[in-house]
Image (spheres, grey):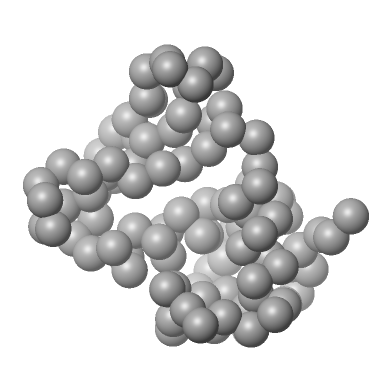
Amino acid sequence: MFQIDPHRRELAAEFKARPFGPHSGDLQQVLNLMRAQPLPGRYILVTLVAHRQWGLARLGPARSGRLEMVEGVRYRSPEEAEWDIFKRRWQELNGEALDME
């Protein structure tokens, strides 16, 4: 099974530069793994103000269950949101925080 190499920080830099692609094959493998994690607990974006503000939530254990909002997390752009979620998923899968801003 494919695993993320925590030393491949250039893939994180690539994502930060172009969160909506196009992505290299190696980065696409990382994203596929991140996005294939089990639904319960998965991070999702929630639109708070159309086209202006987004929040972060986690999916509950049931598909039709309630979302658990992550308190105090607000984004001003989709790019900012995608980068934050990428860093959170990276840490969950590697156990190491990305110290890149």
Residue at 52%, 16% in the rendered image: 62
The percent coordinates of residue 50 (x first, y second) are 11, 51
**Compared with residue 94, is residue 21 higher up or lower down, i.e. above or below?**
below
The percent coordinates of residue 10 (x first, y second) are 63, 83
The percent coordinates of residue 75 (x first, y second) are 24, 55
Residue furthest right in the image: 1
Residue at 46%, 54% in the rendered image: 85
Residue at 57%, 80% in the rendered image: 23
Image label count: 0
Residue 41 occupies which quadrant of the picture?
Answer: top right
Instruction: Using residue 60 as the reference point, say whether residue 80 is left or right of it.
Output: left
Instruction: Using residue 47 as the reference point, say whether residue 13 is left or right of it.
Output: right
Residue 91 visible in this rendered orientation of the protein: no
The percent coordinates of residue 14 (x first, y second) are 54, 83
Q: Is 89 or 96 nearer to us in this picture? A: 89
Residue 43 visible in this rendered orientation of the protein: yes
**Compared with residue 12, is residue 98 higher up or lower down, i.e. above or below?**
above
Residue at 38%, 25% in the rendered image: 68
Q: Name the quarter where the N terminus is drawn.
A: bottom right
Instruction: Using residue 49 as the reference point, say whether residue 64 is left or right of it.
Output: right
Residue 70 occupies which quadrant of the picture?
Answer: top left
Q: Name the quarter where the C terminus is drawn.
A: bottom left
Q: Is 37 or 72 nearer to us in this picture? A: 37
Residue 11 occupies which quadrant of the picture?
Answer: bottom right
**Compared with residue 10, is residue 88 higher up or lower down, i.e. above or below?**
above
Instruction: Using residue 73 as the reference point, say whether residue 43 is left or right of it.
Output: right
